[in-house]
Each structure stands twice: as C-alpha cells, then as structure tokens.
Image: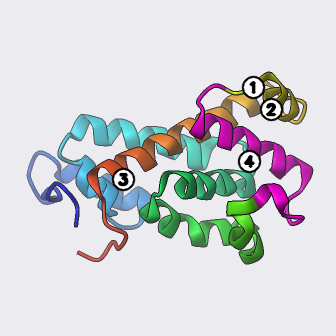
Amino acid sequence: MARIEYADIDAEKVKPLSARIVAERGQMLHIYRMLLHSPAVAEGWLALMTAIRQRCALAGDLRELVIMRIAQLNGAAYEAEQHHAYALKEGVSEAQLAELEDWENSKLFSALQRAVLDYTDNMTLDVKVPEKVFAEVRKRFDEQGMIELTATIASYNMVSRFLVALQVEGSDQV
C-alpha cells in the first residue's frame, strides 16, 4: 500500500492536467496519481519523461534495458512491471530480461548493450563513473547520444527512487 493516499484526479485544480496525462499516457497510472498532489511537479515530470521516452533518438531497446536494469538495482517492482511489455516491444528478449541480473556473465548481450549496462550500473550504484567505463560507452555514442543516455539513466533513477520511497503500488487497478 502506498505511504500517501493517491490524489483525487477529479479535483478542480488538477482536472486539466489529469486529462492531459490520460491523453498522453493512455490511462492514469499510479505514479501520476501520486504526483498530482503537486501539479507543478506532475507537469514537469510529464514533460521530462515524455522527452526521454518519446523524443530522444536513443534506441528503444537500449532505453528499456536501462529502465529494467535500474528497476532491478533499486528494487522498483512497479517500474519493472510497467516497462516489461515495452522492453519486449522494443526488441529486448525474455531471455535477456531473465539474465539481466547477471548480465556481466551472460552471452545474450551485445558489446553495445554491455557498455550501456555497465554505465547504468555505475551511475545507479556509485554515481561516479570510472573513466574506463565512460570511455567504453563514449566510443559508441556522439554528444547527443551521451546526453540522452545519461539523462535516461538519471531520470529513471529519479523515477525508481520516488516509487520506492512512497511505496507506489505495482498494480494500476484502483
């Protein structure tokens, strides 16, 4: 059970934003029900996450591998539940998802995916990224790609930390 009750999405002060969230996301997810306690934060969050998920050039399989790995590392079950189907749709295999926890010993990940996962692990667990890890991922991405990859990792760490701290539930059934 979430630590704070979900916001009333029909309250006058959030109705227009609620409608926009449903229009952009297809439904009112629990994360947005929680965020709507602060319309300003909810609106900024929506803009940032829309940019990360829909406007960046970062390949969808890499984005979803990053998200699933962050969810795993941070114990964010809701995040993993929400993105499992997206990962499959973007070309991540069930076998890769099954071996994601031990990706370093798996043969299912390409050199590019391994570099991205190493960067993700370091940003998530240690914050500071060793030069060797950065150099490995940097040789695969131009400046835009590095910014988008780094922002994706940073943003989804924000998401998982929000979800875990407030114990946002894994099911979007209210």
The relative height of residue 27 versus residue 94 in the rendered view (above or below) is above
Query: First in sequence: mark 3 or mark 1?
Result: 1
**Circle 2 SS class:** helix
Q: Residues within 10 Å of mark 1 (few under 14, many from 20)?
A: few
In the rendered image, which residue does mark 2 sit on?
Answer: 133
**Circle 1 SS class:** loop
Query: Who's the residue at 27% across and 51% down the image?
Result: 166
Query: Who's the residue at 90% across and 30% down the image?
Result: 139
Query: First in sequence: mark 2 or mark 3?
Result: 2
Q: Amino acid at mark 2?
A: Val
**Circle 3 SS class:** helix
Check contact, mark 4 vs mark 1: CB within 8 A: no
- Between marks 2 and 3, how big is the CA–CA gap? 27 Å
Return the x and y of residue 58 as percentages of the image width and height.
72, 44
In the rendered image, which residue does mark 3 sit on?
Answer: 164
* 163 left or right of 80 in image: left
- Between marks 4 and 1, how big is the CA–CA gap? 14 Å
- Between marks 4 and 3, how big is the CA–CA gap? 21 Å
* 94 left or right of 24 in image: right
In the rendered image, which residue does mark 4 sit on?
Answer: 117
The answer to whether residue 86 is seen in the rendering is yes
Q: Residues within 10 Å of mark 3 (few under 14, many from 20)?
A: some
Check contact, mark 1 vs mark 2: CB within 8 A: yes
In the rendered image, which residue does mark 1 sit on?
Answer: 130
Determine the image quadrant of residue 7: bottom left
In the rendered image, residue 26 lying in the magenta stretch gets the answer: no
* 57 left or right of 174 in image: right
